[in-house]
Amino acid sequence: MHARAAGGAGRPIEIKVREIGRLFHALDPLPFRERDLDSAVEDYVVGWARELPGDQSIEIIVHLPREEADRDEAGEIADAIHNYFAYRSQVTQSELKELFRIGRASVLIGVTVLATCFLLGGIADVLVGQSRFGRFINESLVIVGWVANWRPIQIFLYDWWPLARRRALFDRLATARVRVAPA
């Protein structure tokens, strides 16, 4: 496979292959329309699509030798690419939902641990008093309580962004203009 992007705004992502089968995962037994793209092809297309402005439509040109471009399967390449990236978008959406589910559970756990630590810190103040050891126990419990909230904070402030961006990119690729050009 030879691949290049013409670069710049409005320029297509171009892929050149000697045979249609090289676009798809070699072990996938499904018909072309339902096959997974070859991982190198996916990485290449996704890498170049990331470089394009988010408001720009994407065009993918698949260059094939004339005899390959004339095969019936060549007419299914656009659908195969659209189906594949629509599927990847659905998978990424599921990952995002799972991340938020984990985040919600983590918040419940974190808040419970924090409240328990404050409660235990208050009990330690009563039992041990305001001595250095008592302050050590109290502050240690407060630190443990806040550390228990680190993961949910990380999830809801930072971890979801890359998944949402990847899903949006897959959505754009699922609607990209795809055409086959005889080489």
Image: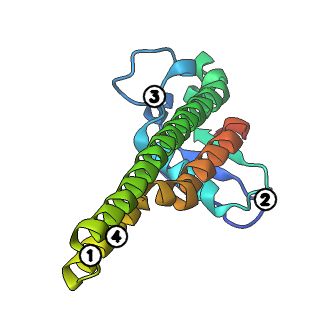
Left or right relative to 155: residue 62: right
Name the residue: 66% across, 30% down. 78
Instruction: Give me the disc on residue 36.
Output: none
Residue 119 visible here: yes
Of labels 3 and 2, earlier in sequence is 2
Element at label 1:
loop
Comparing labels 4 and 2, the label whose residue is closer to the camera: 4
Q: CA distance from mark 3 to mark 4?
A: 57 Å
Please tell me how crowded label 1 is: few (under 14), some (14-19), or many (20+) other residues with Cα within 10 Å. few
Comparing labels 3 and 2, the label whose residue is closer to the camera: 2
135 shown above or below 27: below
Comparing labels 1 and 2, the label whose residue is closer to the camera: 1
Of labels 1 and 3, earlier in sequence is 3
Q: CA distance from mark 3 to mark 2?
A: 28 Å
Q: Position of residue 178 (x, y in %)?
A: 70, 37
- The residue where tag 4 is placed is 143
Q: CA distance from mark 1 to mark 2?
A: 71 Å
- The residue where tag 3 is placed is 21
Instruction: Give me the disc on residue 10.
Output: 2
Comparing labels 1 and 4, the label whose residue is closer to the camera: 1
Residue type, label 1: Gly
Name the residue: 61% across, 58% down. 50
Name the residue: 55% across, 52% down. 160
Residue type, label 4: Ile
Residue type, label 2: Gly
Name the residue: 31% across, 59% down. 120
